[in-house]
Amino acid sequence: MNPANDPSAKGIKTLDKDLRRIALMERALLYTSRPMVAPGVALVFMGLAGLGAMALMGGQPGAIVVVADAETIERELQARQAGLQLAAPNA
């Protein structure tokens, strides 16, 4: 059969074109999601730090305040590393 008249050849060209588009989309997604890795890891760390503080404080009355302060300190440290200035909380 002549390759120009072969229906499967046209299907293969279409499939190749579609796969190239999907591969391009995957690369773009990877490129745009890469900056989100560091904040995600930081968020997990803050959660684990909060759980660790709660575990260490047990059921004491001021335990929630200590956990909240640990989270705030961690957030301030991350903001300073990123070069940001956090607004002072309303007292």
Image (tube, grey):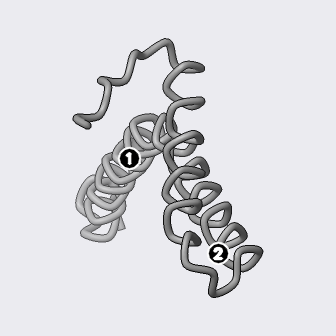
The residue drawn where x is 39% and y is 36% is 32
Where is residue 31? Give x, y as percent: 46, 35
Tell me: 56 left or right of 87.
right
User: What crowding class fits label 1: few (fewer than 14 Cα within 10 Å), some (14-19), or many (20 or more)?
Assistant: few
Identify the element where label 2 is drawn: helix
- In this view, the mark in front (1 or 2): 2
Picture layout, residue 54 above or below residue 83: below
The residue drawn where x is 49% and y is 44% is 72
Name the residue that disc number 2 marks: 54
User: What crowding class fits label 2: few (fewer than 14 Cα within 10 Å), some (14-19), or many (20 or more)?
Assistant: some
The residue drawn where x is 42% and y is 16% is 84
Q: Quadrant of the N terminus?
A: bottom left
The residue drawn where x is 55% and y is 70% is 62
Disc 1 to disc 2, C-alpha distance: 50 Å
Residue type highlighted by circle 1: Arg
Identify the element where label 1 is drawn: helix
Picture layout, residue 39 above or below residue 88: below
Tell me: 90 left or right of 69.
left
Residues tagged 1 and 2 counted as in contact (Cβ below 8 A)? no
Residue type highlighted by circle 2: Met
Q: Residue furthest bottom?
A: 59
Label at residue 20: 1
Q: Residue furthest front?
A: 61
Q: Nearer the viewer, residue 46 or 58?
A: 58
Picture layout, residue 67 above or below residue 81: below
Count of residue discs: 2
Q: Quadrant of residue 78?
A: top right
Which tag, 1 or 2, sits closer to the chain's start? 1
Q: Quadrant of the C terminus?
A: top left
Q: Residue furthest top?
A: 83
Tell me: 31 left or right of 38.
left
Q: Residue furthest right?
A: 56
